[in-house]
Amino acid sequence: MTVTGKPRGKYAKTAGRRREILEAGIDVFSAGGFRSGSIREIAERVGMSQAGLLHHFANKNELLAAVLELRDDQSREYTNGDEENGLETIRGLIRLVEYNSSVPGLVELHCTLSAEATAPDHPAHDYFVGRYAWVNSFITAAFERIQARGELAPGVDPASAARGLIAVIDGAQLQWLLDRESIDMAEETRMFVRLLITVEL
Amino acid sequence: MTVTGKPRGKYAKTAGRRREILEAGIDVFSAGGFRSGSIREIAERVGMSQAGLLHHFANKNELLAAVLELRDDQSREYTNGDEENGLETIRGLIRLVEYNSSVPGLVELHCTLSAEATAPDHPAHDYFVGRYAWVNSFITAAFERIQARGELAPGVDPASAARGLIAVIDGAQLQWLLDRESIDMAEETRMFVRLLITVEL
DNA sequence: GTCTATATGGCGATAGAC
DNA sequence: GTCTATCGCCATATAGAC
């Protein structure tokens, strides 16, 4: 949605500032959630006043939307695997989980906001509902291709496998955030996938 | 921790009042989380002033602790199965998930608060860390007994199975709260358990 | 583009009357 | 046991100077 043609002149500085704000926004919303995180604190982190921040984003909701968009852009790079090969899609997902272990802030952001957003009146509710529906159909399609090659364990339904895989990933994140020594998110994910397929992962 | 000997006289009314407050607390903390939920709103729901509520609970944190304790008391009844039979313990867990489908408020409370409490400075952080550790060892022990009877699928580690089962349950709750039509929590849990064992569930 | 100042309102906690 | 009143703090958003 960002205008892409003009990153020069004084707009370059503005774009940089916006980016700084979004990074700080990830940190603050990660730790306190959206409702309790304050744009004041985000502003202080980038060394400006709260009113100064609101020059770049009309209001708090718009800032949240921009934060979510940035997060999406970043993690989408990981899912760009071979679209034809279902197993490769799943492997890409596991690589994403592995990468997530190195950026606790992003995991915290997702976990905190997705739970908060289960409330129907939350400003990110529709975003998360849509996102889960999309991810679900994406992973279901991958398992369907795996099944078509006869590599899905007998009695396993692709859609159910997708829901289960997403659940395992989210649930493992929660356990990991509560106690980082308690679980290896990627390993737990691999364990689950191995139960679902008949070939080497 | 409640004094159990004296539910008569004027204390009976107080105990009833406390209970009312806790029920309303579940509703409010479910919807808005602890940080954004206000004791003012809880008070209004039971028809009293905020100061009146604070006669029963010294402060907001103490109210949260009491809410969590009540929730624990309620769900503990479901885990009282046959301690010797590992599979029966798992079945009890699935019955609990089934029951949860009928009380969205409790699911919301757990999902919202556990995510919020991943922040180390959250007043319920220690509670959730301890609770997950306890549940984990409880379920691990169940899978160990299943394994001892030769009913665990080959190559499955009891501790890993426990972590995975907890993850599936938590993750399914999140999907269910975001879209109640998208998933059957108990069925998804059963699907996972069937992958882990070699006998009928 | 960033600031100060301010309007407006919600919060938790306490003091003290009844 | 419950209330009203109030204190002190923090929040978002806006107006207007520079």
Image (tube, coloured by chain):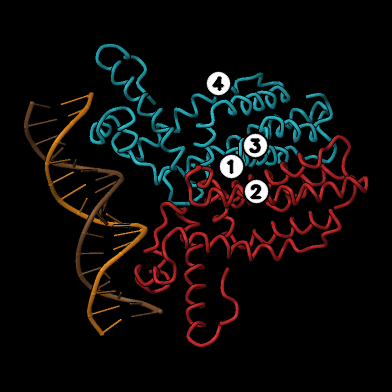
Chain colours: A cyan, B red, C orange, D brown
User: What's the CA distance linking mark 3 and mark 2?
Assistant: 17 Å
Residue type pointed to by label 3: Ile
* Residue ID for mark 4: A77
Residue at 70% across, 33% down: A189
The extreme bottom residue here reads B9
Quarter location, residue A66: top left
C-beta proximity under 8 Å, tags 4 and 3: no
Residue type pointed to by label 2: Tyr
Q: Position of residue A171 (x, y in %)?
A: 64, 42
B80 sits to left or right of A77: right
* Residue ID for mark 3: A169
| Labels 4 and 3 in the same subunit | yes
Q: Position of residue B198 (x, y in %)?
A: 89, 45
Residue type pointed to by label 1: Leu
* Residue ID for mark 1: A178
| Labels 1 and 4 in the same subunit | yes
Disc 1: which chain? A
Quarter location, residue B147: top right
**Precedes in sequence: disc 3 or disc 1:** 3
C-beta proximity under 8 Å, tags 1 and 2: yes
The N terminus of chain A lies in which quarter of the figure? top left
Q: Position of residue A52 (x, y in %)?
A: 24, 31
C-beta proximity under 8 Å, tags 1 and 4: no
Disc 2: which chain? B
User: What's the CA distance linking mark 3 and mark 1?
Assistant: 15 Å
Frontmost residue, A198 versus B6: B6
Residue at 82% across, 46% down: B194
Element assignment for label 2: helix
Element assignment for label 4: helix
C-beta proximity under 8 Å, tags 3 and 2: no
